[in-house]
Image (cartoon, rainbow, N blue to C red):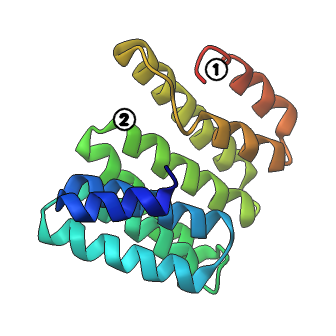
């Protein structure tokens, strides 16, 4: 089943958490493809659903995607500041998946504006959170491949690759 098919199925079931989950992946797809207008469109839909059904984790994810898209599809100092605030809110929720997601987006933003030490720090925190989540839930970390990919983009990729190599047990 594709993400779009999953979204249609979730909407047919009228199950808001499933709709939200499919919207996150659709928004993420548009973000990964660097399609700013489409990212905002899906993020707005996700935001409306999340606010209507009090699903705070989706509010944070939608806002993170919009921080990139509404800054002309790139990260600047203003976008980084927004993402830092959202990352702190994500931590306060205590939801490890959100912390890893927010960390991944913030690390990419730090890297884009040349804050490489901050990039490594936030990737380290995301890796540690992923390790804890994996050991607690005994399941895979869906964002770990993205963490590894981000490491390849950083100027400190050797150090980062060493850090993420320890995630080999986390698919």
Coordinates of residue 161 in the picture (x, y in percent): 79, 29
In this rendering, position of residue 88 left or right of residue 125 = left
Cα–Cα span, label 2 and label 1: 16 Å
- Packing grade of label 2 (10 A; few <14, some 14-19, many >=20) is some
Q: In the depicted view, which residue is nearer to us: 9 or 76?
A: 9
Coordinates of residue 134 in the picture (x, y in percent): 45, 19
Query: Given contact means CB atoms under 8 Å apart, are the residues at marks 2 and 1 in contact?
Result: no
User: Where, by quadrant of the figure, is residue 76 drawn?
Assistant: bottom right
Disc tally is: 2
Q: Which residue is under mark 1?
A: 167
Q: Which residue is under mark 2?
A: 96
- Packing grade of label 1 (10 A; few <14, some 14-19, many >=20) is many
| Position of the C terminus by quadrant | top right
Query: Element under label 2?
Result: helix
Q: Which residue appears at 66% of the width and 56% of the height?
A: 108
Establish if 152 lies above or below 45. Answer: above
Q: Which residue appears at 28% of the width and 58% of the height?
A: 10
User: Where, by quadrant of the figure, is residue 94 drawn?
Assistant: top left
Coordinates of residue 20 in the picture (x, y in percent): 30, 59
Q: Which residue appears at 47% of the width and 51% of the height?
A: 102
Establish if 37 lies above or below 121. Answer: below
Residue 53 seen anywhere in this rendered image of the structure: yes
Coordinates of residue 13 in the picture (x, y in percent): 19, 58
In this rendering, position of residue 54 left or right of residue 10 = left
Residue 86 seen anywhere in this rendered image of the structure: no
Q: In the depicted view, which residue is nearer to us: 51 or 84?
A: 51
Query: Element under label 1?
Result: loop
Q: Which residue appears at 33% of the width and 77% of the height?
A: 45
Sequence order check, earlier mark of 2 and 1: 2
């Amino acid at each position: 089943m594709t993400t779009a098919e999953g979204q249609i199925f979730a909407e047919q079931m009228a199950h808001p958490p499933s709709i939200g989950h499919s919207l996150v992946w659709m928004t993420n797809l548009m973000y990964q493809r660097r399609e700013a207008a489409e990212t905002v469109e899906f993020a707005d839909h996700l935001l409306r659903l999340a606010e209507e059904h009090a699903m705070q984790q989706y509010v944070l994810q939608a806002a993170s995607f919009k921080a990139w898209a509404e800054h002309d599809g790139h990260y600047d100092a203003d976008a980084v500041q927004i993402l830092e605030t959202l990352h702190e809110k994500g931590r306060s929720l205590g939801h490890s998946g959100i912390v890893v997601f927010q960390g991944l987006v913030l690390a990419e933003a730090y890297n884009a504006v040349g804050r490489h030490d901050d990039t490594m720090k936030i990737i380290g925190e995301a890796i540690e959170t992923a390790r804890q989540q994996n050991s607690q839930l005994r399941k895979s970390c869906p964002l770990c491949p993205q963490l590894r990919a981000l490491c390849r983009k950083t100027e400190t990729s050797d150090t980062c690759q060493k850090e993420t190599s320890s995630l080999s047990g986390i698919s």
